[in-house]
């Protein structure tokens, strides 16, 4: 999964998690997105490719309904443009840093190029110390303490989207997405920023060197040195050490103490060409090449993460998607006992099952079993299915009939999918509206009757289902973690 796909997945995750009322994406639309993704990818699909394709389908539907979401979905920094602007700016800074004044005299102990050299050496020292500290850091200790703060600041960045969207689940989803994506993308951003900084440092050095060479074509620079504490031998030793890389690259010789004394504080200086060559060669070895190598390493790391974004699937949300992906279409065989199930109740049960499982649902409704009859047997050719025994709360529970029927369903499906016992409270609750105690007493009687068979019935008002609560109960009964 690449960076763009991971971003879409995290955005859809935030929206679906916040949209508990299914006002943005209905259960059927969520299931359809997964079904379409599986159909398009075929048997070669893996979980991450399926999740990514499902998110793309869902996001396309959401963008059509919520135009303001498009700004959030596309709120991505163009690193290529940022890199180009940074390089140009760094080059200009380097050119400006090479200005040495109207006298064109270069102090060998403090030219602009020496300042660049010292600055980069200090940076290398800091980087090395950070790496050494990383070796001794406890593995369970966070490497970057600022990441949590950065993620918190990202929530503030979502204020603009929240103002646009105003209220509703999408406003909460925007803030959640900003925090989650910032936290996940921080390692990638760190490598990209490191690449920009290293490239910029190398470009500053290139700009400074280029400026001195270009100006040297029209102006004569004079090299000299001044110091309150150093004499010519000490300056010679210092310059031999500092400019050794440049001497190796250019083949020029760093002058000795006698020659440096001639161009020292009392001298008029000398043509600075060889000193510019020496400093340019030194910066090439000490600054430009190492910085470009570090930039390449950071860029390679960023590309590796961008191509294979490390999105962990350990959250409950992804657990539900993984089960849906593995399961495919879920078959449920509904066996009503001694009552005709109204169409509205059938729709309510199928909606609760769809939310509970997150998969396409195929419900097979058996004809209602007559009072005292055994459950109808499934055909041998039927595909394995979860079995749901459906009762009516209006009936008085009887161990020899209702419990025996449910127990027979258990025996019938032994070694296969686990049965579920659901009691529809729609008719009874409507008849005794305003008498919740009576409804509670009847439910208690059903629980007591089924306790002998170690079965826990689920009470659902199918004609007016509370999808959030009912789907959670069904998911638990089916061995899922919930919708």
Image: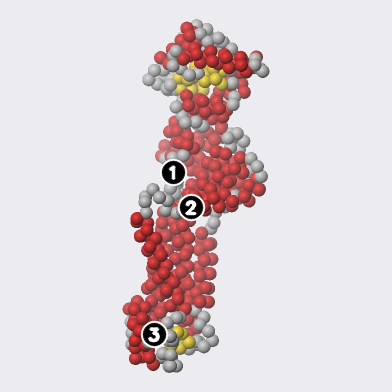
Residue holding disc 1: 312
Q: Mark 1 against mark 2, which lies toward the viewer?
A: 2
Residue holding disc 3: 230
Is 233 placed above or below 191 here? below
Q: Position of residue 267 (x, y in %)?
A: 43, 93
Q: Tell me the element at label 3.
A: loop
**Which picture quadrant has residue 124?**
bottom left
Residue holding disc 2: 147
Neighbour class for label 2 at 10 Å: few (<14), some, many (≥20)?
some
The answer to whether residue 398 of the structure is visible from this angle is yes
Left or right: 136, with 155 as reference point:
left
Q: CA distance from mark 2 to mark 3?
A: 47 Å
Dot 1 or dot 3, earlier in sequence = 3
Q: Mark 2 against mark 3, which lies toward the viewer?
A: 3
Q: Position of residue 261 (x, y in %)?
A: 38, 91
Q: Residue at x 55, y 25 (%)?
A: 470
Q: Residue at x 47, y 11 (%)?
A: 403
Task: Verify CB contact (< 8 Å) between mark 2 and mark 3.
Answer: no
Q: Mark 1 against mark 3, which lies toward the viewer?
A: 3
Q: CA distance from mark 1 to mark 2?
A: 17 Å
Q: Position of residue 126 (x, y in %)?
A: 41, 65
- The answer to which of 330 and 22 lies nearer the viewer is 22
Dot 1 or dot 2, earlier in sequence = 2
Q: Residue at x 46, y 57 (%)?
A: 190
Its colouring scheme is: secondary structure
Is 69 placed above or below 396 here? below
Q: Tell me the element at label 2.
A: helix
């Amino acid at each position: 999964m690449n960076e763009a796909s991971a971003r879409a997945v995290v955005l859809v995750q935030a929206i679906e998690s916040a949209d508990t009322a299914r006002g943005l994406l209905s259960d059927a639309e969520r299931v359809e997105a997964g079904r379409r993704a599986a159909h398009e990818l075929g048997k070669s699909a893996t979980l991450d490719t399926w999740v990514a394709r499902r998110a793309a389908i869902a996001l396309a539907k959401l963008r059509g309904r919520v135009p303001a979401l498009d700004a959030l979905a596309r709120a991505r920094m163009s690193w290529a443009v940022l890199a180009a602007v940074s390089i140009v700016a760094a080059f200009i800074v380097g050119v400006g840093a090479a200005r040495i004044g109207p006298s064109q005299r270069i102090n060998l102990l403090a030219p602009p190029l020496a300042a660049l050299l010292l600055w980069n050496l200090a940076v290398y020292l800091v980087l090395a110390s950070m790496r050494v500290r990383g070796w001794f850091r406890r593995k369970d200790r966070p490497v970057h303490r600022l990441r949590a703060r950065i993620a918190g600041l990202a929530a503030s960045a979502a204020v603009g989207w929240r103002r646009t969207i105003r209220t509703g689940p999408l406003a909460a989803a925007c803030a959640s997405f900003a925090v989650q994506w910032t936290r996940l993308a921080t390692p990638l951003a760190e490598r990209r920023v490191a690449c920009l900084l290293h490239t910029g440092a190398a470009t500053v050095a290139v700009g400074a060197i280029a400026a001195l060479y270009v100006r040297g074509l029209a102006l004569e620079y004079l090299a000299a040195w001044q110091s309150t504490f150093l004499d010519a031998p000490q300056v010679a030793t210092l310059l031999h050490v500092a400019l050794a890389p440049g001497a190796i690259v250019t083949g020029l010789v760093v002058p000795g103490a006698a020659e440096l004394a001639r161009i020292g504080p009392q001298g008029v200086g000398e043509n600075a060409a060889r000193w510019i060559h020496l400093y340019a060669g030194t910066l090439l070895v000490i600054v430009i090449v190492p910085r470009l190598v570090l930039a390449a390493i950071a860029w390679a790391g960023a590309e590796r993460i961008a191509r294979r974004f490390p999105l962990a699937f350990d959250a409950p949300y992804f657990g539900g998607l993984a089960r849906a992906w593995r399961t495919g279409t879920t078959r449920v065989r509904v066996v009503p006992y001694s009552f005709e199930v109204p169409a509205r109740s059938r729709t309510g049960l199928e909606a609760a099952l769809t939310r509970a499982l997150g998969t396409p649902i195929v419900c097979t409704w058996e004809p209602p079993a007559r009072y005292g009859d055994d459950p109808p047997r499934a055909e041998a050719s039927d595909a394995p299915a979860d079995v749901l025994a459906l009762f009516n709360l209006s009936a008085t529970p009887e161990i020899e009939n209702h419990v025996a029927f449910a127990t027979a369903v258990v025996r019938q499906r032994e070694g296969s999918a686990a049965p579920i016992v659901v009691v529809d409270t729609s008719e009874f609750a409507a008849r005794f509206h305003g008498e919740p105690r009576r409804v509670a007493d009847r439910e208690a009687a059903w629980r007591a009757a089924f306790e002998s068979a170690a079965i826990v019935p689920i009470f659902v008002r199918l004609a007016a289902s509370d999808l959030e609560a009912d789907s959670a109960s069904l998911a638990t009964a089916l061995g899922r973690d919930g919708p």
